């Protein structure tokens, strides 16, 4: 272990013993505080490198994630309606500038506030997710296009490159408590590490990718991210050419080096369908 790495215990995935397709509920059971699932969680000790000072080594198309610093105009994050009205347009313009995208459609956002003892059983009570995962599969990404874009636009949009990107940033204060770590795409065995998993909502099913442990995984984070810093996290990319990063496993983790009394993590992630003309 070097001075710029921290030890952490991460939660990975193993297949259900009966070989059935994995599933996991989006909400925790209000009585037990656990999310119903049929897969097996297993913990592994890893080292996570603090990339502070080396941010330029990681880009959306090489590692699958990228850090930026850009103060945003909207900072209150008071309620969903205000976020949609103020933060969405600002973020669309920002991500267009950074990626060269021609069209962006936000489809939801989540505010997470770590509250020890509070059960994550609804959209307004989301906590950091301490489980290695990828938010989308190829099937669910395409389904998102059909669900969130006008039907008459979909055929042409799907002829071109599109992505799902999360814009993640701390809100209200520095993120020292339970920060977000990213697995460098170049260290993933794309054929063997990822398992499509049904994500059960109260009214429908989605699909995410669970992640099996691989000792080759290289984990990175940016220690002490401030509210004017953010990460773009690639969850899907239709450019599957064998060279371009198409996704990013990620997880919240307990940074044992955080100072005593660090404020509990608060963050927002905005999920974006990102379209290109090429």
Image (spheres, grey):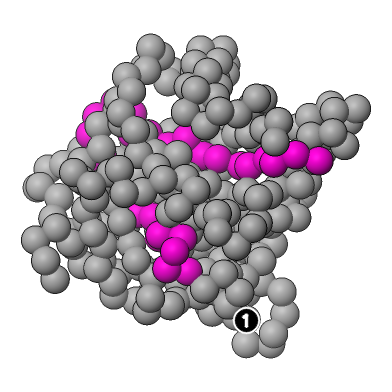
Q: Position of residue 214 (x, y in %)?
A: 43, 77
Left or right relative to 6: residue 277: right
- Classify 10 Å Cα crowding around label 1: few (below 14), some (14-19), many (20 and above): some
Q: Which residue is drawn at 42% across and 20% down?
A: 77
Q: Position of residue 249 (x, y in %)?
A: 48, 59
Q: In which quarter of the image is residue 114?
A: top left
Give the camera-side residue of 239 and 191: 239
Look at the numbered disc 1 and give the secondary structure of its residue. Answer: loop
Going by the picture, which residue comes out furthest to the right?
Answer: 152
Q: Where is residue 132 in the image (x, y as percent from the top left)?
A: 45, 63
Magenta span includes 160: yes
In the rendered structure, which segment of residues is drawn in magenta?
Answer: 159-188
Q: Residue at x 52, y 69 (%)?
A: 211
Q: Position of residue 154 (x, y in %)?
A: 84, 34
* Viewport quadrant of the N terminus: bottom left
Left or right relative to 177: residue 66: right
Magenta span includes 163: yes
Q: Residue at x 76, y 32 (%)?
A: 148
Q: Which residue is drawn at 76% across and 47% down?
A: 142
Q: Name the residue under label 1.
A: 16
Residue 192 appears in view: yes
Going by the picture, which residue comes out furthest to the bottom?
Answer: 18
């Amino acid at each position: 272990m070097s001075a710029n790495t921290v030890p952490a215990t991460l939660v990975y995935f193993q297949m259900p013993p009966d070989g059935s397709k994995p599933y996991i509920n989006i909400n925790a059971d209000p009585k037990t505080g656990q999310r119903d699932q049929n897969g097996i969680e297993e913990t592994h000790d890893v080292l996570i490198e603090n990339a502070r000072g080396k941010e330029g080594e990681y880009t959306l198309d090489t590692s699958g994630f990228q850090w930026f610093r850009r103060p945003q105009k909207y900072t209150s994050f008071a309620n969903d309606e205000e976020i949609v009205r103020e933060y969405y347009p600002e973020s669309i313009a920002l991500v267009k500038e950074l990626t060269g995208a021609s069209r962006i459609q936000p489809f939801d956002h989540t505010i997470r506030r770590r509250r020890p003892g509070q059960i994550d059983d609804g959209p307004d009570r989301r906590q950091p997710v301490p489980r290695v995962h990828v938010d989308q599969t190829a099937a669910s990404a395409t389904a998102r296009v059909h669900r969130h874009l006008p039907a008459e636009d979909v055929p042409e949009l799907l002829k071109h490159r599109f992505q799902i990107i999360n814009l993640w940033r701390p809100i209200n204060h520095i993120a020292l408590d339970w920060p977000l770590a990213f697995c460098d795409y170049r260290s993933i065995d794309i054929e063997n590490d990822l398992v499509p998993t049904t994500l059960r909502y109260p009214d429908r099913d989605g699909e995410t990718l669970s992640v099996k442990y691989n000792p080759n995984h290289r984990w990175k984070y940016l220690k002490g991210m401030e509210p004017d810093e953010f990460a773009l996290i690639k969850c899907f990319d239709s450019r599957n050419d064998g060279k371009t990063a198409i996704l990013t496993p990620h997880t919240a983790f307990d940074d044992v080096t955080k100072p005593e009394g660090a404020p509990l993590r608060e963050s927002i992630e905005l999920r974006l369908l990102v379209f290109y003309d090429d």
